[in-house]
Amino acid sequence: MYKQLITFLFAVAFVASAVPASTASAAIRFAVPPWPGAMVKTEVASQILEAVGYETSTISMNASEVYKALGDGKVDVFMSAWLPTQDMLLEPLLKKKTIRIAGVNVQNTHTGLCVPGYVSAEGVKNIADLAPNAKKFDSTIYTIEPTSGMYILVEDLIKKDFEGLGSWKQKGERVDKMLDDVIKAFKEKKWIVFSCWEPHWMNLTLDMRYLKAMPGSTKLISKSTINTLIRTDIKTEYPDAFMILSRFNVSKLTQGKWTYDVSLKKQTVEETATAWIKGNLSVVRQWLGNLKGANGERAADIIETKF
């Protein structure tokens, strides 16, 4: 069910109906970056909405593309807005009122920079401890995609020569590629500093330590929340679907397990999402409450017959 599309037929129908990009589309369009937790969470929401009669589509793109697409009305929902890490991407769209925050879908999350436990044991406890050990770290911070909020924040620290990081560089790549580098360094007992966040399977499998923040780095190294963003008009176009999305929330342990199941157990996104829904129908029914599906029937009753 996990779809990455806006197909030619959909585009033809879209144009033929003369509906502009900023109004209702034939499907509720989810944007998703290549992050396992975001992929499963989006699939769970998509399967629930489809079960109660809504059409959905899922479009893969990187984080900065997501925000542009939301602003241009080309997608409707984004369920992986880590705040405050992505504030610089979100705030311009909030000011324009083209999107809104529908709700927090994961509480008590954390973003930052991490080092292996064996590096922490040598005295590297906070971000100010990096520059004095530049040679051991090869003056490199391993981060995720260059368009991500985390990359942008690290780049800003380097440009400002924050705590002596002015001569450092960062290596930005897909999450899976970054973690390949991290795991290799762990195996070889090399010194490495890398972007990290919770929930994610890295917290379950790697002996790593989060560096403490210094004044001026608290957006990068911070407690955070993961939020659901929607195109503003969705609330009026699909009021019940909007309410379902606004109520969607899971624990950080749940999302962490999703990343583990997809990345390490090699389960598909689709089967991981379906298994979670089947095992948590009572939670899903709470989200649905007395809301109605696309055909006007009570959504909580419909979901029982689908899963």
Image: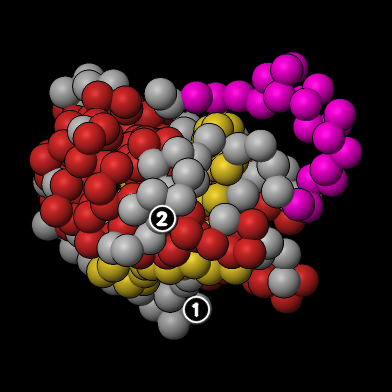
The quadrant in which the C terminus is found is: top left
Q: Nearer the viewer, mark 1 or mark 2?
A: 2
Q: Position of residue 192 (x, y in %)?
A: 32, 43
Mark 2 secondary-structure assignment: loop
Residue 250 sits in quarter: bottom left
Q: Residue at x 43, y 26 (%)?
A: 2
Please tell me how crowded label 2 is: few (under 14), some (14-19), or many (20+) other residues with Cα within 10 Å.
many
Measured along the vertical axis of the image, is residue 177 above or below residue 86? above
Taking 223 as reference, is 252 left or right?
left
Q: Residue at x 63, y 64 (%)?
A: 236
Give the label on residue 216, or none. 1
Q: Position of residue 215 (x, y in %)?
A: 44, 82
- Examine the structure image and report whether residue 236 is included in the region drawn in magenta: no
Q: Nearer the viewer, residue 267 or 26?
A: 26
Query: Please, which residue is most extreme toward the bottom here?
Result: 215
Measured along the vertical axis of the image, is residue 70 above or below residue 124? above
Q: Position of residue 116 (x, y in %)?
A: 20, 47
Q: Over which residues does the magenta segment extend?
A: 3-23
Q: Nearer the viewer, residue 265 or 245?
A: 245
Q: Hey, what amino acid is under mark 2?
A: Lys
Q: Residue at x 84, y 46 (%)?
A: 20
Name the residue carrying label 2: 292
Instruction: Report if residue 66 is visible in the image.
Output: no
Taking 109 as reference, is 63 left or right?
right
